Amino acid sequence: MVLVQPENQHVTKAFDLTGKVAIVTGKHFAMRTSEIKRVLTECRRIPRHRPRSLEGSGRSWGKCVAIIYNTSSTAAETASQIASENKITCRAYQANVTSKDEVTSTINKIKSDFGRLDIVIANSGIASSVPAEEYTIEEWRKIMDVNLDGAFWTAQAAANVFKEQGTGKGSIVFTASVSASLVNVPQKQAAYNASKAAVVQLAKCLSVEWVDICRVNCISPGFIATEILDHHPKEWREKWYDMIPAKRMAQAYELKGAYVFAASDASSYMTGADIIIDGGYVLP
């Protein structure tokens, strides 16, 4: 089998995720997981009078959005809220993505609960700022366990489900980072940068190995204006603003189109790609 080719269809239909079952991992990172779930639940049939927009569009798509979280105390509440607002099924499942057994059994359970699986967004991630000469084994290993190993175990479990389903239509999307392409300053985060560069290369490798099973792509956001950044020193944030040609950070909703594109038939011939969304940050 080769990379699945969908039938020629209207572009609005190609973006439509009606009836798909999607999994999103992670509490929040780069783009908050709750926002990604809303991205998927908001991807509806696009009305003709707004052909270029995925916002404010017609009917709700979803069959199921499943959240895989590790330590969040609000995951079930968030799932309930999303289900109510979008009139879909949205459930929260607890699993540690660094455990191959846990994430595999959880993804298999989701497939069993909903009868199929179509989309997996591997969004779990952590970051730290540590001078490279001072990393402990534990600090280095923790970053790699979550950002790289966790991403792989998630993708592997999904690919095995897609292989069993036999349609070749699955889509895996990793949340990587612009940190895979440059060295951030002034923060010191060699482990994080290395882990995200590895994720981008991992996606390329898997996209070739699994070309007849599913598509595998990355989204690499730049700086996203979430409460996560508020914890960093003001002078850091001022430095970042100065280095971004767009002279602003993105709002989380500005990434939704990329996730929908990567998850849908609109990107049916795209696999192994890394979509950088950063206001030009990597360019100067």
Image (cartoon, rainbow, N blue to C red):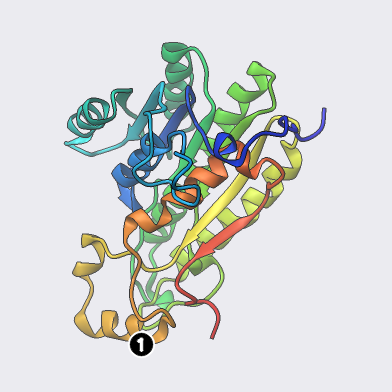
Quadrant where the C terminus is found in the figure: bottom right
Which quadrant of the view contains residue 268? top right
- Residue situated furthest front in the rendering: 49
Measuring from the top left, give residue 157's x and y in whole percent.
55, 29
Question: Please, what is the three-letter code of the amino acid marked with disc 1?
Answer: Asp
16 or 243, nearer to the observer: 16
Quadrant where the N terminus is found in the figure: top right
Measuring from the top left, give residue 33's x and y in whole percent.
33, 44
Which quadrant of the view contains residue 15? top right
**Identity of the residue drawn at 44% across and 63% down:** 192
Measuring from the top left, give residue 160's x and y in whole percent.
62, 25
Can the viewer see residue 225 in this picture? yes
**Identity of the residue drawn at 30% across and 24% down:** 91
**Relative to 166, residue 248 above or below:** below
**Relative to 148, residue 196 above or below:** below
Measuring from the top left, give residue 249's x and y in whole percent.
33, 71
**Identity of the residue drawn at 24% across and 85% down:** 235
211 or 6, nearer to the observer: 6
Q: Residues within 10 Å of mark 1 (few under 14, many from 20)?
A: few
Q: Secondary structure at mark 1?
A: helix
40 or 276, nearer to the observer: 40
**Identity of the residue drawn at 34% across and 65% down:** 128
**Relative to 131, residue 78 above or below:** above
Can the viewer see residue 30 in this picture? no
Residue corresponding to mark 1 = 242
269 sits left or right of 45 in the view: right
Which quadrant of the view contains residue 215? top right
126 sits left or right of 162 in the view: left
